[in-house]
Image (cartoon, grey):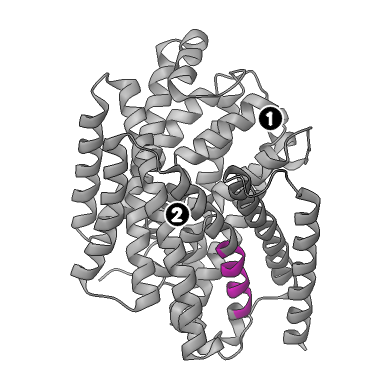
Amino acid sequence: MRPPSKLSSVILYSVISAAFIGPGTITTAITAGATHQLQLLWAVALSTLGCLLLQETSARIVISSGLNLGQASQKCFGHMWGKALMVLVGLTVMLGCAAYEAGNMLGAVSGLNLLYAVDLKILTVLVAAASFAVLWTNKRQIISWLMTMLVGLMGIAFFVLALQQPFSVQEVVTQAVVPAFPSGSALLILGLVGTTIVPYNIFLSSGISKGKTIPLMRIGLTVSILAGGLITAAILIAGTSVQAFSSFPELAGSLREKLGVVGVLALGVGLFAAGFSSTITAPYASSIIASVVFGWEDTRRLRWVWGTVLLIGFLFGVSGIRPIPVILTVQALDGMVLPLLVALLIVVVNQRSVMAAPHLPGLLYNLLLLLMLGSVVLIGLNQVEKALISLNVLSQSYFNVLIWCSGVLMMVMAGWMYSARM
């Protein structure tokens, strides 16, 4: 048996980039490009690096300790509290997978519909059936290869659109490294970070890393996530070609006027690849979460988990009903869970009883994790606030208060980190 190669590691971890580039990412990135041109490109670069940091932390814990996140949590906090924490986080993230599956499926269907004018219900059935067939194989290698091809397809499609825009390489690089905060951009910046750093990806990297080596894990994650970040950047650059974004058919019409049929084809292919890959990875992630949280390894149980998530997406997709209240509620729950999950990673990765000494994080690494915690706390509180405003519980935004809350929580965690290092 040949030892794992760098290529096989890249293919394995391609599921991460396939997971975070979905219809929501496309919508947010195109809106950012249409509204602020290249000015928010730095937010894409920052969120990509943040995603890489958190995925590396999650995978490092598994590889170094030989324990999944659930087992490591129980070792840190005791069986009862560790189990309760993981059940709380895991079930919430699984609900998120189910709630967003309809959007993933509709994104894939919308992409296909731009390519072929077929009845949407028929396309929904085809996408659901294809996703079911892939997941039923229960072959991680097949899923990884398919995700690699879909990420490649997305890359080609959106780079075709991006290269049609009149920007020099120097302009793109400058905007990617120099932060800018144009008026009214705060929520879009948070949206770009929030659509890249998603809770179930942390479980994904944990679930697929057991038995791997840290050097190969880092190569696989780095290539996969940077590729995803570049594709997101290409989507944002493509979005600069339109004045505003309200729907994919309208965007296709604008691209047809500017770029001809090539623009429509590229959008259709890219949107389909993003939606279809997410339609597979959301149920796939839910089964991995069930395995990590509940210790389930039985194939039949895991098929029930991913089958339920896929069925929920299919039923909402084929009915045309958008479960807005459910999605808003899950957004609020995810907003609270992501900071909790990041804080959990920070605590576990700094535990000498869990981590091998050579793999304990250094001071700079911990400082970066602390900054990520502050960012996701702000994103999470903002998601909760938006959900409450949409449900008419709040009448206005309290963004300055959210910033102060994030700062206080960062200082609390910084104090714990200092005591842990003493």
Report the label total: 2
The part of the image, by quadrant, that contains residue 320 is: top left
Give the mark, 1 or 2, whose residue is nearer the N terminus: 2
Q: Position of residue 240 (x, y in %)?
A: 62, 23
Marks 1 and 2 in Cβ contact (< 8 Å): no
One can see residue 211 in this view: no
By secondary structure, the bulk of the magenta-drawn segment is best described as helix
Q: Secondary structure at mark 2?
A: helix
Name the residue tied to disc 1: 38
340 left or right, relative to 146: right
Residue type at numbered disc 1? Leu
Q: Position of residue 101 (x, y in %)?
A: 37, 47
Who's the residue at 45% across and 38% down the image?
23
Q: Residues within 10 Å of mark 1 (few under 14, many from 20)?
A: many
Residue type at numbered disc 2? Ile
Say whether residue 193 is magenta: no
Point out the image quarter for the C terminus: bottom right
Name the residue tied to disc 2: 16
Q: Position of residue 47 (x, y in %)?
A: 63, 50
Q: Position of residue 286 (x, y in %)?
A: 36, 61
The part of the image, by quadrant, that contains residue 22 is: top left
Magenta span: 337-347
380 left or right, relative to 171: left
